[in-house]
Image: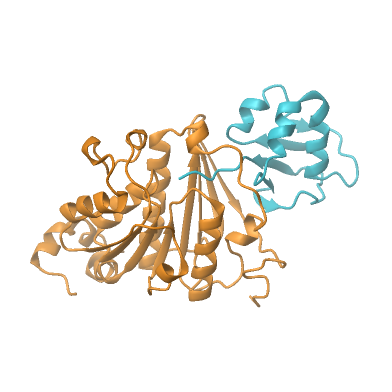
Chain colours: A orange, B cyan
């Protein structure tokens, strides 16, 4: 849908930028992005992408809001406890930006949701199995996959532009037979703003990918909030990878 | 000599661990360094043996059996999976 007069006001701070402008804003408006997981990462991702004017946003999460979520999951209010996260999030995002379309999937991620012609998938989940499902679906559909995670003071971000690069994927980095680590947010805790930082980086990466400014396929960024340290590391393709091992590039 | 970096919460467990290996034996690997920690730093060694711990050499993720060379920087990265 073309930008209207209200859009020119709403997105004026994007339109002022030469490397976004009207063309870039239109790209964001035309984009369909699926956010999987509406927890500590998914909340800032959804808020920033809705505010930025990403035109169609899918939200996938089977969980209900719990009072223990409110320390970090910034989309929800105390009165939301007991409601489906995707319903609360849809209401909040549409109040923030009535010009976007928000679809909800109150269930675990599965191939039928991923098959719905998204331009990009954002992984805000907390488990390896879901990440593997998303990674493989994005690889086969040749669409970008932006994955992040956090626990205690630490965060991780890695993104793949499968439309342009056919080797190196999430399965190359984390062995597909790996067990889940012992520490997770439920048993070890997490600092809320660390999720905000990593979720904001995910949202920025999504915007970069949608606008064509992403050249760091498979580069991992790690953040240690306790010490204020960042680390960027390159990942190698795994020739035995079950997902992309046979790719020629 | 190779430098060692224990990133994030591994740093809490590595306070008394060496930050470098001065004399590198031939065919030393990240796995070998982890095993070296077992006697004097059992908690650190246990944390390094968790699923999904990543290891990088000179800012490139490698396998645990990657040979190490003089001047390498070896980093251990704890698993991060929550959301």
Q: Residue B16: horizontal and vertical position, in percent?
A: 71, 21
Q: Residue A109: horizontal and vertical position, in percent?
A: 44, 61
Q: Is residue A77 left or right of residue A141?
A: left
Q: Is residue A167 visible?
A: yes
Q: Which quadrant is the N terminus of chain A positioned in?
A: bottom left
Q: Residue A161: horizontal and vertical position, in percent?
A: 49, 67
Residue that extends furthest to the right in the rendered view of this protein: B26
Q: Is residue A240 left or right of residue A145?
A: right
Q: Residue shown at 71%/27% (left/top)? A: B43
In this view, the residue in front, A50 or A22, is A50
Q: How many marks?
A: 0
In this view, the residue in front, A79 or A44, is A79
Q: Is residue A93 left or right of residue A42?
A: left
Residue that extends furthest to the front in the rendered view of this protein: A82
Q: Is residue A112 above or below residue A91?
A: below
Q: Residue shown at 86%/38% (left/top)? A: B24
Q: Is residue B76 left or right of residue B29?
A: left
Q: Which quadrant is the C terminus of chain A positioned in?
A: bottom right
Q: Is residue B1 visible?
A: no
Q: Quadrant of residue A76?
A: top left
In this view, the residue in front, A21 or A227, is A227
Residue that extends furthest to the bottom in the rendered view of this protein: A248
Q: Residue A162: horizontal and vertical position, in percent?
A: 51, 70
Q: Is residue B41 above or below residue A193?
A: above
């Amino acid at each position: 849908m073309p930008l209207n007069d209200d859009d020119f006001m709403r997105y004026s701070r994007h339109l002022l930028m030469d490397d976004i402008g009207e063309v870039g804003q239109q790209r964001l408006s035309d984009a369909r992005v699926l956010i999987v997981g509406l927890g500590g990462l998914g909340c800032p991702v959804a808020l920033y992408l809705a505010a930025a004017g990403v035109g169609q946003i899918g939200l996938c999460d089977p969980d209900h809001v719990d009072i223990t979520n409110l320390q970090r999951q910034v989309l929800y209010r105390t009165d939301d406890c007991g409601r489906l996260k995707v319903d609360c999030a849809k209401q909040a995002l549409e109040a923030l930006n009535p010009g976007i379309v928000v679809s909800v999937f109150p269930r675990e991620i599965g191939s039928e949701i991923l098959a719905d012609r998204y331009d990009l998938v954002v992984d805000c989940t907390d488990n390896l199995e879901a990440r593997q499902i998303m990674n493989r679906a994005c690889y086969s559909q040749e669409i970008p996959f932006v994955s992040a995670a956090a626990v205690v003071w630490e965060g991780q971000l890695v993104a793949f532009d499968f439309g342009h690069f056919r080797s190196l994927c999430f399965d190359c980095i984390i062995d597909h037979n790996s067990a889940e680590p012992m520490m997770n947010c439920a048993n070890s805790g997490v600092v809320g703003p660390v999720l905000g930082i990593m979720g904001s980086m995910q949202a920025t990466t999504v915007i970069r990918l949608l606008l064509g400014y992403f050249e760091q396929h498979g580069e991992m960024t790690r953040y240690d909030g306790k010490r204020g340290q960042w680390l960027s590391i390159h990942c190698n393709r795994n020739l035995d990878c079950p997902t992309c091992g046979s790719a020629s590039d | 000599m190779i430098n060692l970096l224990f990133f994030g919460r591994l740093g809490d467990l590595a306070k008394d661990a060496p930050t470098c290996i001065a004399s590198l034996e031939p065919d030393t690997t990240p796995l070998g360094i982890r095993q070296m920690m077992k006697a004097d730093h059992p908690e650190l060694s246990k944390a390094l043996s968790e699923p999904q711990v990543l290891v990088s050499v000179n800012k490139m993720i490698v396998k645990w059996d990657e040979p190490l060379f003089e001047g390498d920087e070896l980093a251990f990265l704890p698993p991060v999976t929550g959301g």
